[in-house]
Image (cartoon, rainbow, N blue to C red):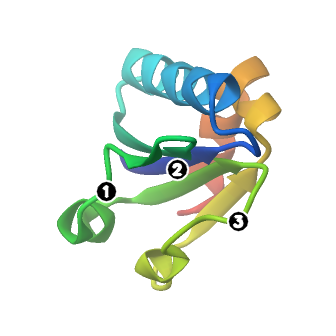
Amino acid sequence: MKIVAVTACPTGIAHTYMAAEQLEKTAKALGHQIKVETQGAMGIENQLSAKEIAEADAVVFAVDIEVELLERFESKKTLRVGVAEAIKNPKGVLARVTIDTR
């Protein structure tokens, strides 16, 4: 499964990147392809392309703030969770996205 994700927390520092790392590590361990965009104090990093979004089977928003450029995802089914959930239970988040988006 191809997954794209956006992580963002209010301060946009540690938790944003911790969530991204956990999702990436867990998705790869489960055999999924993933690319994670972070939105934080440094702005948008690792920005998802229109092609990556279009080809994605699932979109995960692990965010505690509003997603910038949200309109890019209008045609996609999405799962929204808090940053803490992505950090503490990335396997559960990915299990939900693979079920909820089919």
Badge nearest the viewer, 2 or 3: 3
Q: Label 2 neighbourhood size at 10 Å, few (<14), some (14-19), many (20+)?
A: many
Callout 2, which amino acid? Val
Furthest residue to the front? 41
Q: CA distance from mark 2 to mark 3?
A: 11 Å
Badge nearest the viewer, 1 or 3: 3
Report which residue position mark 3 lands on: 66
Report which residue position mark 1 lands on: 48
Q: Residue at x 66, y 26 (%)?
A: 90
Q: Position of residue 81 (x, y in %)?
A: 76, 48
Q: Secondary structure at mark 2?
A: strand
Q: State whether residue 49 is above or below residue 72.
A: above
Dot 2 and dot 3 residues touching (CB under 8 Å): no
Is 94 placed left or right of 73 in the picture? right
User: Which residue occupies the foreground of this view, 87 or 40?
Assistant: 40
Question: Does label 2 or label 3 sit earlier along the sequence?
Answer: 2
Q: Which mark is residue 6?
A: 2
Q: Position of residue 42 (x, y in %)?
A: 47, 41
Q: Position of residue 29 (x, y in %)?
A: 42, 15
Q: State whether residue 100 is above or below residue 76.
A: above
Q: Which quadrant of the figure contains the N terminus?
A: top left
Q: Label 3 neighbourhood size at 10 Å, few (<14), some (14-19), many (20+)?
A: few
Callout 3, which amino acid? Glu
Dot 2 and dot 1 residues touching (CB under 8 Å): yes
Q: State whether residue 65 is above or below residue 5.
A: below
